[in-house]
Image (tube, rainbow, N blue to C red):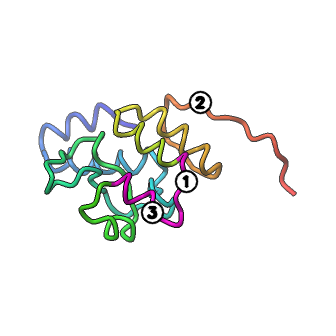
Amino acid sequence: MHIDDAVFLEDLCPKFRLRQWRKSIHKFTGKSCIYCGKPSESIDHVLPRSQGGLSTTENCVPACLSCNGDKSDENALYWYRKQKFYDPRRAMAIRAWLDGDLRLALRLLQWASPKYKVNNANYEEDKPGYKAA
Ligand SMILES: [Zn+2]
């Protein structure tokens, strides 16, 4: 990460800041949808903008287009509970994300999906105990 460059460019160009922010959201989950684990192609507002949801990291999660479109303006946790791919660990992760505890959220996501690529410098990686066949 070139933090110094980013700060410099942000000052020059607010759009760059927005793009960086969107990128960082996807980066947290290794570009996986927080709901289903598929590649995230969009940012989903957990509390929809139509209901006063803000574009903050706490309210914005990486989501695939299918989940984002299907969820629409529904309450995210309520919607998620009805999905076939519902996983209580992911639901907990979403709740932690909303609380602003990304570290816990990523931990829960990793637990839900061991293949998860988590790109958080603060994240302590658990060494997998199994051997490749
Ligand atoms: Zn999805």
Q: Residue furthest right?
A: 133
Q: Report which residue position mark 1 lands on.
A: 87
Towards the viewer: 81 or 26: 81
Q: Report which residue position mark 2 lands on.
A: 124
Towards the viewer: 41 or 109: 109
Q: CA distance from mark 2 to mark 3?
A: 32 Å
Q: Secondary structure at mark 1?
A: loop
Q: Quadrant of the C terminus?
A: bottom right
Q: Is residue 82 magenta?
A: yes
In the rendered image, the vertical position of residue 62 relative to residue 1, given as above or below? below
Give the extent of the magenta segment.
76-89
Q: Are marks 2 and 3 in contact (CB under 8 Å)?
A: no
In the rendered image, the vertical position of residue 47 relative to residue 9, given as above or below? below
Label 3 or label 1, whichever comes before in sequence order: 3
Q: Which mark is residue 82?
A: 3
Disc 1 residue crowd, few under 14, some 14–19, many 20+, Cα 10 Å: some
Q: In this rendering, which labeled residue sits more in front, label 3 or label 1?
A: 3
- Answer with the quadrant where ligand 1 appears in the image: bottom left
Determine the residue positioned at 47% across, 63% down: 39
Label 2 or label 3, whichever comes before in sequence order: 3
Q: In this rendering, which labeled residue sits more in front, label 1 or label 2?
A: 1
